Image (cartoon, rainbow, N blue to C red):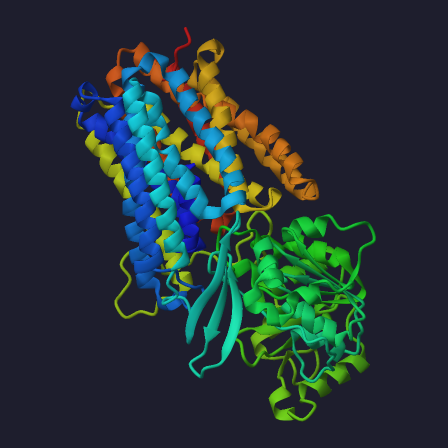
Amino acid sequence: MFELVLSRLVDFHLGADNAYLALPIAFLGLALGSLYVHFRPTTLEKFNIQRELMVLAALCVGGLLFAFVLFSWIMPVTSSVVIAKQLDYLAKKTAVFVIIMVLPFFSFGRILTSMYQLRRDEIGSIYAADLLGAALACALTPVAFHFGGLPTVVVVLIVLSFAPLLLASTERRSRIIVASVALVVALGSERLIDYADRTVSYAQWGAAGTYEELDRAWNEHSRVAVVKRVSDGGKTSHAIIHNNSRSNVHVWPYRDRVRSVSVLQGTDAAWALGREPKNILVMFAGTGAEMIRFDELAHHKAKITGVELNGLVKKFGRESELIASYRIAEFLDKPNIDLVIDEGRHFLTTRPEGTKYDLIYLGSNAATTAVTGHTTKYLDTVEAYNTYLDLLAPGGIMVFDHQPLHKRIYNMREVFAQRGIENFEDRIMIVDDKGRSDDDLVLSPDGFTDEELDRVVAVARGEGRNKKKNARKIRYLNQKRLRDHKYRDTIEGEPGQTFVDDRPFMKDLELDTYELLPPEGDAKTLGWYVTWIKITTVVVLSGIALLFIGVAALKRDARAPIPVLLYLLVTGFCFMLCEVAIMAKLELFLTQPLLSMAAVLSLFLLTSGVGSAIYPRLTKLHDTRALAGLAVLAVMFVMFTLDWMVGNLLHLPVALKLVLATLATAPLGTVLGLFYPHVVSCLVDQDRAQTVSISYGLSTLASVVGSAYALAAMINIGFNALLQQAVVGYAVLLVGALVYQVAGGKWLSRAQ
């Protein structure tokens, strides 16, 4: 549970580009705690469970409170709007966060390793109990987030930090003291966290002007806040900030009026062409800003459906008295307006048979909202574009408003090719957006008539009283002098790289330009930072792992034999390749990252716990060759099964999909749960019980590197590639075990 809460803390305070740090932080802390026990064996003689649990509770409570308060006041939240100017600031925040949050996991690693060492004959049962308890907590965490959001879950976790100490207390007086302290700390924490959350500083948030938070709330998706912005010129406007400060929802007023086309832009394109859409779909609808404009352009005659992921955005728009003058509730209550709260791909795949839209409008930069950690990136893949076109009526158009277009064009070219639609260049139009850095793309699979093109060119010159202000440059139209070189090669040249559900990231890591210590004075972009933080994490953690492995090898009486060392490194690394890849593959299937992370962690922990518990009875599997062979088959099974499920079953209810995900991943989780009890049993059988502590530390160190590597590598190579690498890893272990056994090796098998 602590790990899931950590991921959400990172997501809000450090941004989604750093959200992946939760896994490496957890495993690094566990590994360091285990190695501490190995290097200081006298701690086993002095081990006192009550004292250790007291330290653990103090570190958990202190770390959570310190991080929440520190990042609310002293190092406040940043925005994606200005984050490129604050990368050094963000790096400092990240370093502070890692140091604070490693400590609780370090303490837990000490406790866990000590228990494994002192009760090594019961390793299967203890390991299983640990995994099963963690699985239960992971399963309950999304429920807690749904009903309370991050502040509530942090308070719950603070209370739960005292639960082990309470259970370990043997005297009634001790239990009363622990319960009383827990109650006082919980009440104080709730007040402090609430105050910190109410007074979050926006000093680092905006690019210009001042920001005042008027209202805020949390749910399972993110923190959502209604904000008043006062520009440097004194102009006041309102926005709803959500997606953990990365998205800024426009709040536009409803005036119950009609309008005519006077400017060529994404929202007005259909009417500029002379078309009259009657059924309109708006993705990333927010509070309905673009829906209001469409309603005005359609003279209130079109059926308009909006899709928004976060229900709090709609709730604030409808119910907040602070923006009541915008009349959003009145607009949303109109019979032709329907603002739906749903995950985008789930909405698209659950439309009734025969549903068709004349206009599909995408008004958010979906795939670049974050490199990782959000399902919106799955609304810009080849598979998503195919789904959009399935729902587009004959003669309909799609509009991509204010988005980087080149890679989207490559994706759409691929979709047209798959569907046998030729002459792509005749079915696309790109219009300059004066006030923004990106342009608007208008796509019509059926093409444009000569009359429509004449109308568009006329509107682009500017109409009405503000002709000069309304004029727009056409960046691309397949006519003479309208094929801007900025897009010509992308549209007419060789096809480029596409992104799909298995690799939905529009931004690659910039591996060619990576430097551990970048030269002073070089411009730092967000792309540079994302690459630097991810690769540097892998490099630093790998260095730490190699250092401790080398130091551990110096203690001859307690070091792991070379075959066992290699076994632990391979299995720990491959375990994380599997876990991270499956977590990523299920993110789209289960509709949100938190649910996917919680489901995979709980499923892996639960099934691994089952595997550990039943290991002693599976005597035919007390052989590394058998375990490695089973792992190869299980990884291949889960890879093909999840591909089929994601490709065909997105429309099912989430509860049913959770059941299917459990059935698909359970065999692999059970098999992977056999590996650690097996190697510990092999060591005990060979009278090397003193190496149990280092075995857990080495396995966890391998998982540290594996998690950091997987979370970085999947951006460039995709999810299935990670599973394929895991197959190779387990296959190498299988071949190595076969050769080792033939050579008479004794460390990797208990079978006689």
Q: Is there any visible trace of residue 628 in the rendered image?
A: no
Assign the C terminus to one quadrant of the image. Answer: top left
Examine the rendered structure and indicate whether residue 701 appears above or below residue 502: above
Name the one closer to the observer, 482 or 613.
613
Q: Position of residue 454 (x, y in %)?
A: 76, 84
Depth order, front residue of 519/312: 312
**Image position of 116 (left or right of 738):** left
Q: Position of residue 417 (x, y in %)?
A: 71, 59
The residue at the point 72 percent across, 62 percent down is: 333
Residue 510, quarter of picture = bottom left
Residue 594 drawn at (x, y percent): 51, 44
312 left or right of 741 in image: right
- Vertical comparison of 306 with 255: above or below: above
Q: Quadrant of residue 586?
A: top right
* Left or right: 644 as drawn, with respect to 619: right
Residue nearest the observer in this picture, 261 or 67: 67
The quadrant the N terminus occupies is top left
In this picture, is 676 found above or below 343?
A: above
Residue 575 seen in render: yes
Towards the viewer: 172 or 472: 172
Q: Residue at x 37, y 42 (%)?
A: 187
Q: Name, please, the residue furthest toward the top.
A: 752
Which residue is at a point 40% across and 29% down the rendered structure image?
571
Percent across and percent down for residue 91 are 31, 57
